[in-house]
Image (tube, coloured by chain):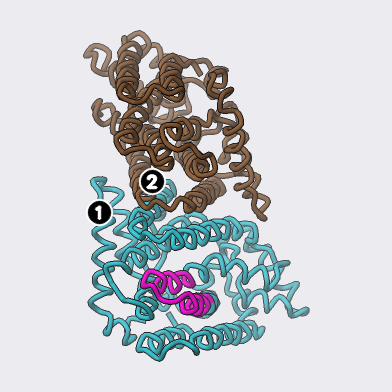
Chain colours: A brown, B cyan
């Protein structure tokens, strides 16, 4: 993602966002600044802010307004990651210790609360009530999704639909509203912001499916954490759901899931990873991700042919092929 | 509180708030509905919504507008309680099992996130950007306060100032903005909403000081949890700070605090409670609470002599004398 042209073309404004993120997370409270900055410095692709900026080019682009939505969206994303790491007992993210591993679960919970509230404070500069309505609805859905994922841990009886609803809430909605709200803040017509929502939504689904595939197929170097982390936590992802549809494999995978569950994830998962990799589930999941990418690009079709449109298509293709 | 006349006079509108709270916490997600309702049904005095309603009487009173700020303020309060229970390892609140005790810490964390997001969704109906700015700033301060309390656990070297800043963030700010925002949503003049803020702020400080006294002096029946819970958690409250100022007592209290800390709170605290009760610290804390009550009532002085003003004074006196 770092190598994409967008980061070159938008370098100045991405820099503005980066500085705002840093400035806003400074507090008088040393520990809170440290935990927040730890999270921020762990990097990430700032994909949500970049989408806000690109969407803003479909209207009256003003970085001084767009930052009030780009910065909060990155902060809401970060806050949800810290809380997720508590639930998942994750020790590594993006190759670095998580807040809960470096400090503890309670500190991670409060760091998440703080980053979340900071995001709200910055978003409060936007005076369009519709923006706040869309944002808050998405945040409610995200929080339901957080709880929902616990319910489905280790459950082999879940459907494709269960999975899609989960990744909608976990990932796709926030990416969708990044595009939509960027356009809205720039006063683009509603037809445009709706199309951009649709683009972001489909890109978001593809992004999460790719992420889930990488967890099963990537190396620790590529993904910044040990492969198979999802299955150790009981997070049943799309390739696993597809693999479970194979009647011969199903009982073997179920037995492995039970064994992993009983061991609380503290066990070798290479056998079940091999089963999934050999099942064709990865390829089917990958094909579905590609379909969402195609839908995302199709949503952009009627939009004016500006540079940002080409950049969004580039983002979509990047996600389709990403390996980290 | 339940016996106050306000609850009789405002019965209909308090009922509106109560129903809105219930309706909004219903989700498709059974567990989330259950945990949220568990919290809601545990009761509480709905003091923040009541203050919103009373403050609204200083402007153009409209329950259909006021509810959009009264309901969120109660929800933000509830969300902070669930997260606090995680930090404090609390098993009882208002005489009932806490969410973390009945389910677990992770479920409590996500229940808090959900209730918080729901509050935002409802508040998004208010289209005055200033309301959102005040609200979000207070939420940031509250989240800093959450982290701050961890830092001061078991520390006998903290000052009165440290304590006051902590209870400002923990309690006083949210009560202050309940009064302020109720007036703002009802389009009362700024001079009025500022006075009401000041009233709420001082009442909030007194309220928390009383709460902290009750934890040291109340019976389990009165306070809905075992007395001495604060000191077991390492939460050093005002009477303890005053008691520590007695040079003869200080080393004995410090030794007790070390012992309790080493036992992780799993020990008898009756000796240190006796020391504090005998130190005059309770009386000094009580006198300070009374001073804040007097300041709160003084803040109301220039406001028009409407019924709500008498009710607010009644609330202040109730808090000054509360025993549960």
Residue to which mark 2 is pinned = A135
From what the image shows, is residue A274 above or below residue B178? Answer: above
Q: Nearer the viewer, mark 1 or mark 2?
A: 2
Image position of A229 (left or right of A159): right
Image position of A33 (left or right of B74): right
Q: CA distance from mark 1 to mark 2?
A: 20 Å
The residue carrying pointer 1 sits among few (fewer than 14), some (14 to 19) or many (20 or more) residues within 10 Å by Cα, namely some
Q: Residue at x 54, y 76 (%)?
A: B205
From what the image shows, is residue B186 above or below residue B113? Answer: below
Label 1 and label 2 in one chain: no
Q: Which residues are magenta?
A: B175-201
Q: Secondary structure at mark 1?
A: loop
Query: Where residue A89 sits: x, y (%)?
Result: 49, 36
Query: Where residue B116 sits: x, y (%)?
Result: 40, 54
Pointer 1 chain: B
Q: Nearer the viewer, residue A68 or B142?
A: A68
Q: Main secondary structure of the magenta part?
A: helix
Pointer 2 chain: A
Q: Nearer the viewer, residue A309 or A84?
A: A309
Q: Residue at x 32, y 56 (%)?
A: B36
Residue A255 part of the magenta segment: no
Residue A123 appears in the figure: yes
Q: Nearer the viewer, residue A289 or A22?
A: A22
Query: Where residue B290 sits: x, y (%)?
Result: 56, 87
Q: Residue at x 47, y 39 (%)?
A: A77
Residue B26 badge: 1
């Amino acid at each position: 993602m770092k190598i994409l042209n967008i980061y070159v073309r938008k370098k100045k404004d991405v820099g503005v966002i980066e500085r705002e993120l840093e400035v806003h997370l400074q507090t008088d409270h040393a520990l809170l600044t440290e935990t927040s900055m730890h999270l921020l410095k762990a990097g990430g692709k700032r994909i949500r802010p970049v989408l806000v900026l690109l969407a803003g080019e479909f209207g009256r682009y003003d970085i001084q307004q767009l930052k009030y939505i780009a910065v909060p969206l990155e902060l809401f994303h970060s806050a949800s990651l810290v809380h997720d790491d508590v639930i998942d007992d994750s020790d590594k993210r993006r190759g670095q210790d998580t807040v809960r591993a470096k400090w503890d679960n309670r500190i991670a919970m409060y760091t998440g609360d703080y980053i979340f509230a900071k995001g709200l404070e910055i978003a409060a500069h936007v005076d369009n009530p519709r923006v706040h309505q869309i944002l808050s609805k998405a945040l409610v859905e995200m929080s339901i999704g957080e709880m929902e994922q616990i319910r489905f841990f280790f459950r082999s009886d879940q459907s494709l639909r269960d999975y899609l609803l989960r990744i909608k809430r976990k990932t796709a909605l926030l990416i969708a509203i990044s595009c939509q709200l960027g356009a809205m803040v720039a006063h683009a017509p509603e037809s445009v912001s709706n199309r951009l929502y649709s683009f972001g939504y489909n890109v978001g689904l593809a992004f999460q499916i790719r992420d889930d595939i990488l967890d099963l197929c990537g190396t620790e170097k590529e993904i910044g954490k040990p492969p198979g982390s999802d299955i150790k936590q009981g997070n049943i992802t799309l390739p696993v759901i597809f693999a479970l549809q194979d009647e011969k494999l199903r009982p073997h995978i179920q037995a492995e899931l039970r064994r992993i569950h009983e061991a609380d994830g503290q066990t070798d998962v290479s056998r079940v990873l091999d089963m999934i990799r050999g099942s064709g589930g990865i390829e089917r999941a990958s094909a579905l991700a590609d379909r969402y990418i195609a839908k995302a690009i199709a949503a952009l079709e009627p939009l004016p042919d500006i540079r940002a449109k080409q950049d969004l298509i580039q983002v979509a293709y990047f996600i389709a092929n990403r390996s980290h």
